[in-house]
Image: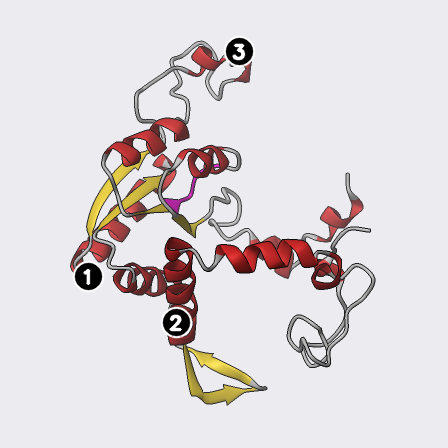
């Protein structure tokens, strides 16, 4: 049996993860299935680096709500993600922020950099095509290019990470890297990272639009074809 939290049908009022003393969980409940992992994680939070990061993350989460105003039991949200990111950086005393962005969001990256700088943060930014290396260098065939027979720069997320590592940024922000390229960047960055925006070429960089319309326009995704 493996954890399947996505399929838990219990309400927040009875879930064991929300009510450890009196709550319950289904057979596939991760809280019930993985006590050793949870204990290991609890120990990790006690290290100085992880403890500071976790505490500031929790405090920053709280600051995203006005708990004096509730609707259907939920506090009123008061910050967008870019505000949340800026405030988290300040709470951690981060000064140098790395921006790893996709060339298709060059304009957006410039706006983000200006906003960060307006809030007293220094930015170091690197676009995905840095280095200007043809896709053929990693074995991509001409017919696999967007424009066969022409130079076509590969996305270079490992170089993005290495450049920001050398720049000794305090924290890195990902903006619109492709699926897979984002994974390579995150795995090679020596500093903690967050994702400000994800790429979705079809849905205006809002992949949840397909989830929100899963009962209608994007219902075909349920067929598995």
Of the two numbered discs 1 and 3 on the same chain, state the one appearing first in sequence. 1
**Image coordinates for residue 80, horizontal then vertical, percent:** 38, 66
On the picture, is 88 further left or further right than 77? Answer: left
Provide the major secondary structure of the magenta segment.
loop
Task: Please say whether residue 169 is one of the residues in the magenta stretch.
Answer: no
**Residue at point 40%, 18% (across, down):** 152
The residue carrying mark 3 is: 141
User: What is the distance, in whole Å, between disc 1 and disc 3 at their CAs?
Assistant: 45 Å
Q: Is mark 3 on a helix, strand or loop?
A: loop
The residue carrying mark 2 is: 59
Of the two numbered discs 1 and 2 on the same chain, state the one appearing first in sequence. 2
> Quadrant of the rendered structure where residue 116 is?
bottom left
**Image coordinates for residue 53, horizontal then vertical, percent:** 39, 59
In the picture shown, does residue 106 fall above or below 14? above
In the picture shown, does residue 154 fall above or below 30? above
Q: What element carries label 2?
A: helix
């Amino acid at each position: 049996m493996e954890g399947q939290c996505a399929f838990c049908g219990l309400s927040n009022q009875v879930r064991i993860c929300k009510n450890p003393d009196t709550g319950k969980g289904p057979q596939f409940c991760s809280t019930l299935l993985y006590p050793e992992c949870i204990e290991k994680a609890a120990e990790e939070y006690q290290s100085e680096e992880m403890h500071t990061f976790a505490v500031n993350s929790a405090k920053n989460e709280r600051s995203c709500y006005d708990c004096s105003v509730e609707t259907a039991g939920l506090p009123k949200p008061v910050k967008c993600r870019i505000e949340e990111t800026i405030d988290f950086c300040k709470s951690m005393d981060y000064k140098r922020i790395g921006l790893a962005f996709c060339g298709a969001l060059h304009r957006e990256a410039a706006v983000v950099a200006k906003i960060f700088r307006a809030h007293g943060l220094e930015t170091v930014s690197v676009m995905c095509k840095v280095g200007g290396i043809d896709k053929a260098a990693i074995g991509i065939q001409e017919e696999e290019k967007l424009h066969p027979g022409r130079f076509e720069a590969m996305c270079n997320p490992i170089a993005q990470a290495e450049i920001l590592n050398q720049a000794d940024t305090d924290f890195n922000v990902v903006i619109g890297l492709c699926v897979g390229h984002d994974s390579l960047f995150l795995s090679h960055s020596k500093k903690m990272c967050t994702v400000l925006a994800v790429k979705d070429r079809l849905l205006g960089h809002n992949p949840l639009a397909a989830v929100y319309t899963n009962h209608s326009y994007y219902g075909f995704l349920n067929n598995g074809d």
